[in-house]
Image (spheres, grey):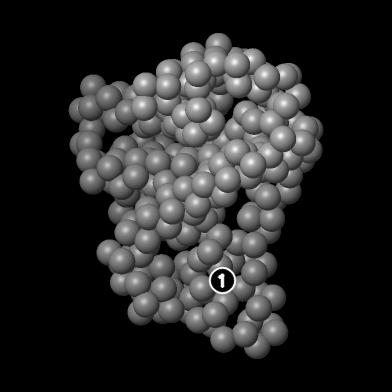
């Protein structure tokens, strides 16, 4: 455990010094500033006003930006160290492979989640200073969703990183995975499957394997409890999950998927020719 924590701390310090982290933090901090600048905290949409409206918009933007940032920066973790010859140095130290792998993943999780969380906290503090009402329930729910999304794509990134033999290949594979998940959102996936006369239940089940679709639908559920925007698909989701059940699924499933991908990546990692 001590080695795991030291590895996580080393990865955290290394990432904080990297240029990509500065850009990453500025992106999410800049989003909040722009949302305030354009007056979204003062607008009203579908009953959401003030900070609630800002958080709804922020979480939608995070869905588009966060996964690709997490994937691209994470896939260089193992593949980049393999190219740089770090493994030879690492194996000369009394650090187990499991401590290094899971410590690296834990440290990277803190790095990718911290700017997103701090930006939300900053928005709430600024709103409180301005006398706005703090939507604590919405904040807690969105924090849980962002934790799940970060962990999910972090696990996928670690899996890609262990499979790829170079950082260039890893980055290309990460981009392909992200693009595939975007393409298989409901607009394309459900359209093709229903055209092929696939039962709606099966089509929705396949769509909800996509973590991006799960996250997108969960964020919609707060301001659209009946999922009117999804059309007939909403009946399948609500009949099988219910509102509370789907919210729990949206938090738990990405975490399980990310953990499974990371575990597979670890199995590949410890059996591979590290040097």
Number of marks in the rendered image? 1
Q: Nearer the viewer, residue 36 or 187?
A: 187
Depicted 160 relative to depicted 126: above or below: below
* Percent position of residue 104, x then y: 51, 28
* Percent position of residue 29, x then y: 47, 24
Q: Nearer the viewer, residue 242 or 81?
A: 81
Q: Is 57 situated left or right of 170 in this image?
A: left
Q: Kindly state the secondary structure of the residue where label 1 is placed.
A: helix
Q: Is 148 situated left or right of 222 in this image?
A: right
* Residue labelled with disc 1: 206
Depicted 62 relative to depicted 245: above or below: above
Q: Nearer the viewer, residue 165 or 48?
A: 165
Depicted 208 relative to depicted 31: above or below: below
Residue under the point 52% across and 47% down? 263
Q: Quadrant of the N terminus?
A: top left
Residue under the point 27% across and 25% down? 125
* Percent position of residue 154, x then y: 53, 40
């Amino acid at each position: 455990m001590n080695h795991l924590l030291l590895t996580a701390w080393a990865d955290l310090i290394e990432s904080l010094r990297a240029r990509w982290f500065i850009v990453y933090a500025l992106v999410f901090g800049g989003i909040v500033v722009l949302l305030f600048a354009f007056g979204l905290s003062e607008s009203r949409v579908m009953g959401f006003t003030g900070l609630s409206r800002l958080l709804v918009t922020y979480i939608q933007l995070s869905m588009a930006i966060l996964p690709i940032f997490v994937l691209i920066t994470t896939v260089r973790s193992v593949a980049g160290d393999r190219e740089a010859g770090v493994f030879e140095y690492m194996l000369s130290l009394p650090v187990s492979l499991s401590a290094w792998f899971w410590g690296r993943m834990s440290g990277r999780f803190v790095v990718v989640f911290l700017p997103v969380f701090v930006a939300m906290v900053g928005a709430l503090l600024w709103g409180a200073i301005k006398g706005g009402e703090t939507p604590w329930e919405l904040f807690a729910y969105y924090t849980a969703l962002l934790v799940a999304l970060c962990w999910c794509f972090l696990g996928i990134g670690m899996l890609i990183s262990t499979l790829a033999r170079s950082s260039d290949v890893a980055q290309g594979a990460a981009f392909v995975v992200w693009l595939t998940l975007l393409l298989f959102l409901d607009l394309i996936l459900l359209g093709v499957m229903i055209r092929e006369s696939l039962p709606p239940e099966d089509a929705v089940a396949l769509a909800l394997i996509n973590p991006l679709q799960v996250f997108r639908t969960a964020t919609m559920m707060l301001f659209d409890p009946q999922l009117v925007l999804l059309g007939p698909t909403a009946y399948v989701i609500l009949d099988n999950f219910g509102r509370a059940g789907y919210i729990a699924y949206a938090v738990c499933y990405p975490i399980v998927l990310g953990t499974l991908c990371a575990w597979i990546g670890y199995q590949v990692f410890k059996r591979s020719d590290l040097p």
